[in-house]
């Protein structure tokens, strides 16, 4: 459980907030941000982080090919509940007029609802912000929301065209929130290339992400997926292991993938250890005992 208080007034509060946000424990992260939401200086940032966690607790990349085949999809009722909770938090934000972050979050909620009419409303509001193709991107966050909207509408070419506009955009290591949004844009573009079997382009993008954000769990996970698809199980295990450790061993889908690749490359004792780690945190996680751990034990005995 992530029990640390946010150190309010600290010069590294943005980084501390992101550390909590990506702790792998969304409920604990929400509790931590909840303790900061009434603070005059940092409360608004805490609220925005709470909204993003509610909308995407597992920090998934929308439209993902490289994901756990066992993971459950969010149903309409869950989406609706998440959107309503996010709207409630957004109402607590004090500075709304002419606030670009508020406008962006408002439209993020519309997109996350999954309702086609809401998604189209968000696009109508955000496309003018992006301007025309070839113009400098003023808001990386708007690019991300628009791309997600197009993905949900099954308009992949439009999503790809929007995301490509970020490639020439400079990375900023000083702004943690900006770095997060930029990383997500690049990761979504990499995911599209993975879907299209363009491994070379995907690899290049993922290496760029890690160059600027060495703790990107999803980048390591995608690299693991690419190596697994090439049947390079040892290399895949190395990448999944990085993702597993960065997730603080709290993401069972990554643990499952790591255990599977350890099994495939005959690292049987390591495989069993990872299975135990997953089952300790998630005792009912499907199939990992029967399909991976039991097979590893049988291989050791034979």
Image: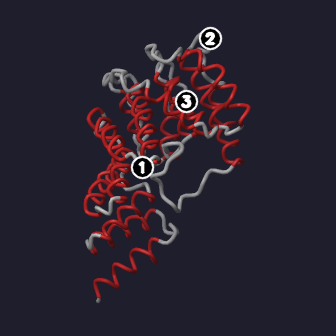
Residue at 28% over, 74% down: 268
Q: Give the spatial CA distance, label 3 vs label 1.
A: 24 Å
Q: Secondary structure at mark 3?
A: helix
Q: Earlier in the sequence, mark 2 or mark 3?
A: 2
Q: Earlier in the sequence, mark 2 or mark 1?
A: 2
**In the displayed structure image, the side of residue 134 where residue 259 appears, left or right:** left
Q: Which residue is mark 2?
A: 97
Q: Secondary structure at mark 2?
A: loop
Q: From the image, state whether disc 2 or disc 3 is nearer to you.
A: 3
Q: From the image, state whether disc 3 or disc 1 is nearer to you.
A: 1
Question: In the image, residue 194 lies at what x, y percent?
Answer: 42, 47
Question: In the image, residue 195 lies at what x, y percent?
Answer: 47, 48
Q: Give the spatial CA distance, label 2 vs label 1.
A: 44 Å
Q: Quadrant of residue 291?
A: bottom left
Q: Give the spatial CA distance, label 2 vs label 3.
A: 20 Å
Residue at 60% over, 21% down: 93
Eyeballing the image, is 274 above or below 56?
below
Eyeballing the image, is 187 above or below 292?
above
Q: Which residue is mark 1?
A: 197
Residues at circles 2 and 3 in contact by the CB criterion of under 8 Å: no
Circle 1 crowding by C-alpha within 10 Å: few under 14, some 14–19, many from 20: few
Q: Secondary structure at mark 1?
A: loop
Circle 3 crowding by C-alpha within 10 Å: few under 14, some 14–19, many from 20: many
Colour treatment of the image: secondary structure
Checking the image for residue 145, the label placed there is: 3
Q: From the image, state whether disc 2 or disc 1 is nearer to you.
A: 1
Residue at 43% over, 28% down: 164
């Amino acid at each position: 459980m992530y029990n640390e208080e946010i150190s309010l007034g600290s010069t590294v509060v943005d980084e501390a907030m992101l550390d909590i946000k990506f702790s792998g424990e969304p409920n604990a992260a929400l509790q931590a941000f909840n303790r900061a939401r009434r603070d005059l200086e940092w409360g608004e940032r805490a609220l925005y982080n709470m909204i993003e966690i509610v909308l995407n607790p597992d920090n998934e990349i929308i439209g993902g090919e490289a994901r756990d085949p066992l993971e459950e999809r969010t149903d309409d009722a869950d989406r609706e509940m998440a959107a309503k909770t996010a709207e409630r938090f957004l109402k607590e934000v004090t500075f709304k007029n002419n606030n670009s972050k508020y406008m962006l979050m408002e439209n993020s909620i519309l997109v996350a609802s999954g309702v086609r009419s809401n998604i189209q409303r968000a696009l109508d509001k955000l496309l003018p912000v992006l301007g025309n193709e070839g113009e400098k991107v003023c808001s990386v966050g708007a690019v991300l929301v628009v791309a997600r909207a197009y993905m949900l509408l099954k308009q992949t070419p439009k999503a790809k065209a929007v995301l490509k506009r970020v490639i020439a955009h400079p990375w900023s290591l000083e702004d943690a929130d900006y770095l997060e949004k930029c990383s997500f844009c690049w990761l979504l573009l990499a995911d599209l290339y993975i879907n299209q079997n363009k491994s070379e382009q995907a690899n290049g993008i993922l290496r760029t992400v890690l160059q600027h954000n060495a703790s990107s769990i999803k980048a390591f996970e995608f690299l693991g997926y690419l190596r697994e698809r090439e049947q390079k199980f040892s290399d895949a295990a190395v990448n999944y292991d990085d993702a597993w450790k960065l997730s603080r061993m709290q993401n069972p889908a990554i643990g499952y993938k790591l255990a599977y690749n350890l099994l495939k490359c005959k690292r049987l004792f390591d495989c069993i250890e990872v299975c135990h780690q997953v089952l300790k945190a998630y005792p009912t996680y499907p199939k990992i005992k029967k399909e991976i751990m039991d097979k590893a034990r049988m291989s050791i005995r034979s």
